[in-house]
């Protein structure tokens, strides 16, 4: 399918910031894909709504145009809908159930209006650009989270030391999604819309939105987000938004456990996000990878004891690499990794395991064998293609 490189591009884009009682970090990597099609948005303090924030991840496919446009315009499209500002800025400081419903409606309208507007982009209207994008976002108000998901990117909220809530992925094999696709005259083959597209909801993808007599939410692919509201609690720890390049190799509990552990070691959220990306690459993700981490006052904090244990673990791994190579200098770094894997070290980071220490293994190997190629990034299972239409 030509969707992969011979070697992954591992340079990262990272950011961090804070305000409104929260901190955020993010990281993204092109990885094995031939193009970087992910985009993101992180805004702390909205215009005229300084105590609201917005975070989102957009996972593009068949091109990067739609995902980039969504990252630039979705928030404004939502906040400019009728009634959003009035409903989101109550006079008494407490948002009512009716106002919550108005905000939800504004989010839904924002998605649908943006999808309609993008049809008129010159390159889209001409048919030159056929790209689409999933979208997962969270509007964080003083008392509530407003989650919106369209596709198979995902948001997970950690509360009281566990994965408390997550958005649901929109896949063609989901019964309600499959029913809509079939009613629109389509089919689900090899778990894809018409055997081609791996998501059942997305922005863009207009070639799947041309069924006459059907509304925008009744097409083969729907731009309608699934919206969930959660009340904020003092025990909220952090929120993770990520594309499926992350979720393909880590489940909700694993990622939350890993983030929770990393927060006790690294004060810098960029570093935590970067370690997530690296761990997922070592775990076998072949997709673009993007992750946004939002931390609240209840998040774990750096612990000297945890940092010391991590240093001791790194030293243990370095020592084992040296011992293994001394016994057999011809071993590849992959074989050294496998040997350490059999050691069953019980102090490895929860959720990340030895994959989260792969960089330590490779750096130690390279230091001991400076003239030997330790590049372990080899393309395997290249017929995997989670996001791209089949050509």
Image (spheres, grey):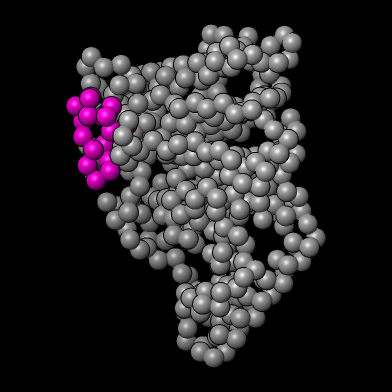
Whether residue 295 is situated above or below residue 284 in the rendered picture: above
**179 over 81 or under it: above or below:** below
Q: Is residue 179 magenta?
A: yes
**Looking at the image, which residue sits at the far right?**
304
In the figure, residue 11 lies in which quadrant?
Answer: bottom right
Find residue 299 and report its horizontal and vertical position in percent: 71, 44
In x, y percent, where is residue 351? Answer: 57, 57
Say left or right for 43 vs 117. Answer: right
**Looking at the picture, does residue 22 appear above or below residue 253?**
above
Residue 197: tell me if it is visible. Answer: no
Can see residue 331? yes
Where does residue 140 sit, x and y in percent of width and height? 64, 28
User: Which of 171 and 126 lies nearest the eye of the viewer?
Assistant: 171
Report x, y in % for residue 129. 33, 31
User: Is residue 247 located in the magenta-colored stretch of the structure?
Assistant: no
Quadrant location of the C terminus? top left
- Comparing 80 with 107, the one in front is 107
Q: Residue at x 60, y 86 (%)?
A: 323
Image side of residue 167 versus residue 233, left or right? left
Judge by depth and name the residue closer to the eye, 188 or 253: 253
Give the magenta range: 177-193
Task: Tell me the residue at 26%/17% (across/down).
Answer: 214
Residue at image position (27%, 29%) is 179
């Amino acid at each position: 399918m030509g969707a992969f490189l011979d070697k992954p591009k591992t340079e990262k884009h990272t950011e961090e910031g804070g305000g409104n009682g929260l901190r955020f970090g993010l990281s993204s990597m092109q990885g094995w894909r031939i193009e970087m099609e992910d985009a993101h948005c992180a805004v702390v303090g909205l215009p005229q709504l300084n105590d609201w924030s917005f975070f989102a991840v957009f996972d593009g496919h068949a091109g990067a145009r739609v995902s980039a446009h969504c990252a630039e315009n979705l928030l404004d499209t939502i906040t400019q809908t009728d009634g959003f500002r009035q409903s989101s800025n109550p006079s008494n400081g407490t948002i009512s159930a009716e106002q919550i419903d108005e905000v939800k409606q504004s989010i839904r309208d924002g998605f649908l209006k943006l999808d309609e507007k993008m049809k008129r982009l010159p390159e889209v209207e001409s048919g030159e650009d056929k790209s689409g994008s999933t979208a997962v976002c969270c509007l964080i108000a003083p008392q509530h989270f407003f989650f919106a998901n369209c596709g198979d990117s995902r948001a997970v909220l950690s509360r009281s030391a566990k994965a408390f809530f997550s958005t649901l992925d929109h896949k063609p094999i989901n019964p309600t999604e499959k029913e809509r696709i079939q009613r629109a005259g389509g089919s689900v083959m090899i778990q894809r819309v018409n055997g081609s597209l791996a998501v059942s909801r997305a922005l863009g993808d207009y070639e799947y939105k041309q069924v006459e007599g059907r509304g925008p939410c009744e097409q083969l692919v729907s731009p309608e987000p699934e919206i969930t509201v959660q009340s904020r609690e003092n025990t909220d720890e952090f929120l993770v938004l990520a594309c499926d390049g992350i979720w393909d190799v880590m489940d909700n509990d694993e990622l939350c456990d890993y983030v929770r552990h990393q927060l006790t070691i690294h004060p810098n959220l960029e570093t935590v996000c970067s370690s997530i990306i690296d761990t997922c690459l070592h775990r076998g993700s072949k997709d673009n990878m993007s992750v946004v981490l939002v931390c609240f006052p209840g998040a774990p904090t750096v612990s000297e004891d945890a940092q010391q244990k991590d240093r001791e673990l790194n030293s243990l791994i370095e020592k084992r690499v040296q011992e293994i190579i001394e016994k057999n200098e011809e071993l590849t770094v992959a074989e050294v990794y496998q040997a350490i894997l059999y050691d069953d070290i019980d102090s490895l980071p929860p959720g990340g395991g030895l994959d989260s220490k792969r960089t330590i293994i490779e750096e130690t190997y390279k230091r001991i064998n400076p003239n030997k190629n330790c590049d372990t990034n080899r393309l395997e299972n290249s017929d995997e293609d989670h996001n791209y239409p089949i050509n």
